[in-house]
Image: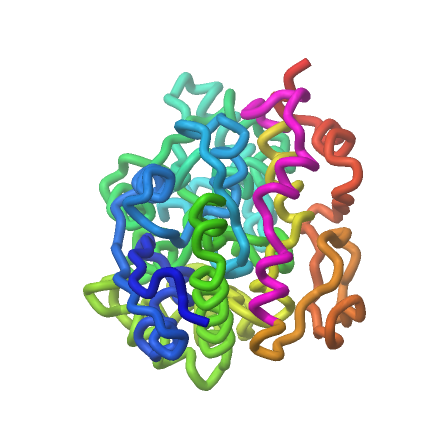
Amino acid sequence: MSLERTQLRLGFIALNDCAPLVVAREKGFFEAEGLSVDLSREASWANIRDKVAMGALDGAHMLAPMPLAVRLGVCGEPARMIAPMSLNLNGSAITVSTALADAMRIADAQGMTVRPRTARPLTKVVAERKAQGLPLLTFAVVFPFSVHNYELRYWLAEAGLDPDRDLRIVVTPPARMAARLAAGDIDGFCVGAPWNALAVADGYGEIMVYAAELWGVGPDKVFGLTEGFAERHPLTVSATLRALIRAAAWSDEPGNRAELAAILAHSRYVDAPEEVIARSLTGAPPYALGEPGPDHQDYIIYHRYAASFPWRSHAVWFMTQMLRWGQIGPEADIAGTAEAVYRPDLFRAAAAELGAPAPLVDEKVEGLHASPWTLDEATAPIPMAPDLFFDGGRFDAAQPERYAAGFAIGRMRS
């Protein structure tokens, strides 16, 4: 049966987690599905949102909370966006300037030796600055509705810092983060690879904690498009998903990671030094110059551990963070929005056509597993990774309001 559309324009931001789209084009997976795809590098996440909503892009590499926020009407003009596939787990990190890292060591030398590193040394610096009447420290995130915003806030609040009162949080495009840190415009940031590694490589940044340490397999980006496009072009969407699933699997093979770094480094894509891009892909990326992290492949995950599956429990978790920080109110239909936006049905259909395993359930409890485990509720057993939160918390999507209200620091509306 012929595809409704064979020519597509898909957007992306210069980050390592755009890999499934880039690989699908560069390694011929789109072409094998009868698709001719033009990839458009965009300057900001707002551009991605608006161009997908208005049809200037047929789909895009997208922040996982974005289609949820757009659907809820709290992020730009409301639109019926969907996310039929996750593009990666992990991939981001929280980085501070070397000057701030030094101040944290002076304030709490012992705390700075602990891994995963908490924000408790930063708490002491903030208190000292407040006593001296100094300006608030400024941290940057890529977008208000992003895992990066929620990771940073989670990390800060766990140590007793109020992100809205004890610091300033500003928005900066990913590729501008390292330059702004070097210029002293910001004191820290949370962003996806490779921009943390670039700050470390250039000697003006130090990574405090990787996403893989905050939540063993936390979601990050999705493939997003409008519901209307999917309804008008079901065969095209299925072909696109098949190509992206194959590309994600290729990207996750250890033997392909060095080639992946070379592909992403091209000026058309991430446009950063190949050796910097490779640091989150091929082994033990450093926290700081001379301080490597643990050697494993889970700093960014594209396919393993059902990474491509659009878990509705992930969607609900994002909305609990929106609720916690006052971005949405208690009137928001969390369960209904998760069901409307995250589309495991579309993913399962595409995976079945490839003969690839897929979960048979839409949700799972997060934070239960300290060691590798197996998801048996799938078309074939799927090996899964430890999924602990760094603070020992657990998340059950069946009780989102209770979960969001369970934190000591937040901005929940009455």
Considering every residue shown, the one lying at the far bottom of the view is 255
Q: Could you say which quadrant of the image residue 97 lies in?
A: top left
Is 303 colored magenta in this rendering? no
| Residue drawn at 65 percent across, 54 percent down | 311
Q: Which residue is situated farthest in the front direction here?
A: 1
Magenta portion: prevailing SS class: helix
Count of marks placed on residues: 0
Range of residues picked out in magenta: 324-351
Q: Is residue 334 above or below residue 347?
A: above
Residue visible at 54% across and 55% down? Answer: 84
Q: Of 322 and 5, which appears nearest the observer? A: 5
Q: Single out the residue that lies furthest toward the top.
A: 414
Task: Tell me, yes or no, if residue 63 can be seen here.
Answer: yes
Q: In the figure, is residue 158 to the left or right of 79?
A: right
Answer with left or right where residue 371 lies relative to residue 411.
right
Is 369 rendered above or below residue 407? below
- The residue most toward the left is 267
Q: x, y percentage for residue 197?
A: 37, 60
Q: Nearer the viewer, residue 219 or 284?
A: 219
In the rendered image, residue 9, in percent from the top left (x then y), is placed at 29, 56
Residue 199 appearing in the image: no
Q: Front-most of 406 and 4?
A: 4
Q: Quadrant of the C terminus?
A: top right
**What's the residue at 65%, 34% (across, down)?**
320
Q: Quadrant of residue 272?
A: bottom left
User: In the picture provided, is 361 more to the left or to the right than 45?
Assistant: right
Residue drawn 55% across and 43% down? 151
- Look at the image and name its color scheme: rainbow
Judging depth in this view, the residue of 110 and 387 nearest the camera is 387
Q: Position of residue 268 (x, y in %)?
A: 21, 64
